[in-house]
Image (cartoon, rainbow, N blue to C red):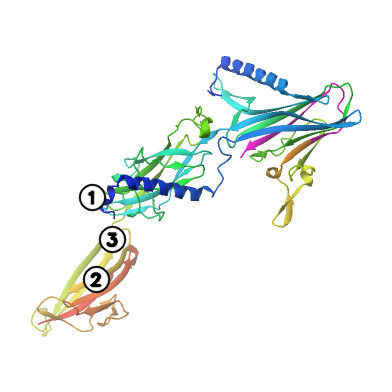
């Protein structure tokens, strides 16, 4: 989670961020070949040799010249898997990569849209909602700096890329299994349009720029899935008095039966059942079972113990539970003082 | 080069410009040793006419984008009074271009390729390239030069054409 004060960034940090982004881009530039760089001039001259009246001669043709113009293209690709969220989660991040697939240097504006159709709820963009993966970790953390539109629009060389987070909060009204979409759009600042649209003189070094197949703009959509694990816990008791009855008399035994079950999608990780021994009762030693298997009172390698380090407590570790695990049954006994 | 949706008037105008371009190229052509040789480079322009039909035409390739195909045409004429023998036309393939396999064309010529910067030439099938210590058949991307070897003499006044296509990397 990002502390609120991280959202105010002094001007000096903007400058540092720009430098870092550039450094990152330089590293990723060499990876692939984007095509012949804009501004390249290709000359061609043919040569003809022949024998005329017994003399061998060689002549050259005129030289043709082609100038490679800039093709503007961009690709946005979601890097994150589906993000599992719970109601009221804050600062949940989706990671995207923006790649300049054209053959010249381009500047791109970034925009978020979380108000999309086709999903079940609208994530709420954080303020600010777009961050650079400044530290290159792939995880959204305090080292990552926010994007300031118009101020630090990423400048990408041909084949260069930059990793971007979209950060959203999850409304409290969502329920399990609902989907929420959030979209990142990268738009060339030179221009957009149908493929083939020309921007005269606006390419690298003053060559013409032509919109490529991307239209000069691309987007991708990330998904949040509400996966709040719901657990049902039911506790039942049975009293057995010393006289064969069911009266809660001193000396009577109470058998507690607790059933735990995951009733939704998702995983309850490292689930631990804990139950305080009620006052005016005493735990009956070695009475804990988990799914009918005995669990020793000692703190050891098995699934539980009778913990007397504080208030006397029965502890049973249930591990990672999903709906498929079904009912988990813990039983222990106490005697009434 | 501007609007791709040109009307008939625009197309006529374009044809006129093309003619002018061709004329100016001719004026630049070299006239040495009694042979005249001219190179032009063109690309295919696809336009949609007013009837919504796609039309393709060759236009001067002043500018290209990666992935675009260009067509080089070399025309030569014997302007002397005697036949020219052993006529060989050689054209490099710029390193930013990839030869389009099968595109080389030249009536009455034997077409050969080089994969070593024009030092040696052989037929398409005979060329190999060393890769990781073993030879493999040469591919279109390996070609550095093309040459057209005329099978017969070029008579006085006769002319010929050589052509190939390449794609901008």
Q: Is residue A299 left or right of residue A283?
A: right
Rendered image quadrant of residue A317:
bottom left
Label 2: which residue? Answer: A273
Q: Is residue A253 magenta?
A: no
Label 2: which secondary element: strand
Label 3: which residue? Answer: A263
Q: Same chain for the residues at labels 3 and 1, yes or no?
A: yes
Give above or below for A288 relative to A36: below
Expressed as whole percent of the image width and height from the top left, the position of residue A302 reads 31, 79
Q: Alpha-carbon distance for marks 3 and 2?
A: 16 Å
Q: Which residues are magenta?
A: B148-169
> Closer to the observer: label 1 or label 2?
1
Q: Earlier in the sequence, mark 3 or mark 1?
A: 1
Rendered image quadrant of residue A326:
bottom left
Q: Earlier in the sequence, mark 1 or mark 2?
A: 1
Give above or below for A239 relative to B122: below
Q: Same chain for the residues at labels 3 and 2, yes or no?
A: yes
Give the quadrant of the C terminus of chain A.
bottom left
Q: Alpha-carbon distance for marks 1 and 2?
A: 27 Å
Q: Is residue A48 left or right of residue B53?
A: right
Residue at far front of view: A12
Q: In the rendered structure, the residue with mark 2 lies on which chain?
A: A
Q: Earlier in the sequence, mark 3 or mark 2?
A: 3
Q: Which mark is residue A172?
A: 1
Residue A146 visible in image: no
- Residue at coordinates 86% horizontally, 27% vertically from top-left? B154
Label 1 crowd (10 A; few <14 / some 14-19 / many >=20) = few
Expressed as whole percent of the image width and height from the top left, the position of residue A94 reads 37, 50
Give the quadrant of the N terminus of chain A.
bottom left
Q: Is residue B151 magenta?
A: yes
Q: In the rendered structure, the residue with mark 3 lies on which chain?
A: A
Which is nearer the eye, A257 or B104?
B104
């Amino acid at each position: 989670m990002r502390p609120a004060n991280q959202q105010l960034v002094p001007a000096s940090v903007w400058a540092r961020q720009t430098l870092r982004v550039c450094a990152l881009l330089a590293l990723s530039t060499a990876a692939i070949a984007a095509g012949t760089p804009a501004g390249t001039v290709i000359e061609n001259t043919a040569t003809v040799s022949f024998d005329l009246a017994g003399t061998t001669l060689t002549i050259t043709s005129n030289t043709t010249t082609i100038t490679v113009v800039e093709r503007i293209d961009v690709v946005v690709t979601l890097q994150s898997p589906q993000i599992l969220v719970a109601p009221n989660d804050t600062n949940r991040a989706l990671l995207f990569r923006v790649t300049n697939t054209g053959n010249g240097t381009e500047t791109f504006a970034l925009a978020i849209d979380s108000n999309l159709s086709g999903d079940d709820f609208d994530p709420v963009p954080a303020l600010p909602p777009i961050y650079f993966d400044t530290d290159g970790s792939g995880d959204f953390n305090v080292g990552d700096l926010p994007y300031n539109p118009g101020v630090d629009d990423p400048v990408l060389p041909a084949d260069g890329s930059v990793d971007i987070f979209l950060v959203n909060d999850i409304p409290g009204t969502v329920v399990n299994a609902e989907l929420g979409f959030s979209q990142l759009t990268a738009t060339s600042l030179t221009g957009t349009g149908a493929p083939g649209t020309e921007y005269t003189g606006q390419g690298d070094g003053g060559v013409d720029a032509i919109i490529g197949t991307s239209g000069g703009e691309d987007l991708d959509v990330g998904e949040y899935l509400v996966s709040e694990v719901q657990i049902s816990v039911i506790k039942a008791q049975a009293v057995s008095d010393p006289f064969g009855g069911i009266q809660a008399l001193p000396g009577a035994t109470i058998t507690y039966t607790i059933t735990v079950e995951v009733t939704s999608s998702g995983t309850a990780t490292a689930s631990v059942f804990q139950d305080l021994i009620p006052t005016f009762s005493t735990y009956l030693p070695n009475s804990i079972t988990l799914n009918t298997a005995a669990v020793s009172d000692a703190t050891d390698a098995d699934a539980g113990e009778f913990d007397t380090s504080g208030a006397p407590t029965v502890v049973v570790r249930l591990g990672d539970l999903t709906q498929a695990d079904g009912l988990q049954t813990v039983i222990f006994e106490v005697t009434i003082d | 080069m501007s609007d791709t949706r040109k009307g008939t008037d625009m197309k006529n105008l374009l044809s006129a410009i093309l003619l002018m371009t061709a004329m100016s190229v001719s004026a630049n052509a070299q006239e040495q040793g009694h042979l005249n040789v001219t190179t032009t480079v063109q690309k295919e322009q696809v336009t949609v006419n007013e009837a919504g039909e796609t039309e393709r035409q060759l236009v001067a390739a002043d500018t290209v984008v990666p992935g675009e195909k260009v067509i080089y045409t070399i025309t030569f004429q014997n302007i002397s009074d005697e036949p020219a023998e052993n006529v060989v036309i050689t054209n490099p393939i710029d390193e930013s271009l990839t030869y389009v396999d099968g595109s080389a064309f030249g009536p009455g010529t034997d077409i050969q390729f080089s994969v070593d910067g024009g030092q040696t030439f052989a037929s398409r099938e005979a060329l190999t390239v060393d890769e990781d210590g073993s030879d493999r058949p040469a591919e279109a991307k390996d070609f550095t030069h093309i040459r057209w070897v005329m099978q017969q003499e070029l008579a006085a006044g006769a002319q010929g054409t050589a052509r190939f296509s390449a794609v901008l990397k």
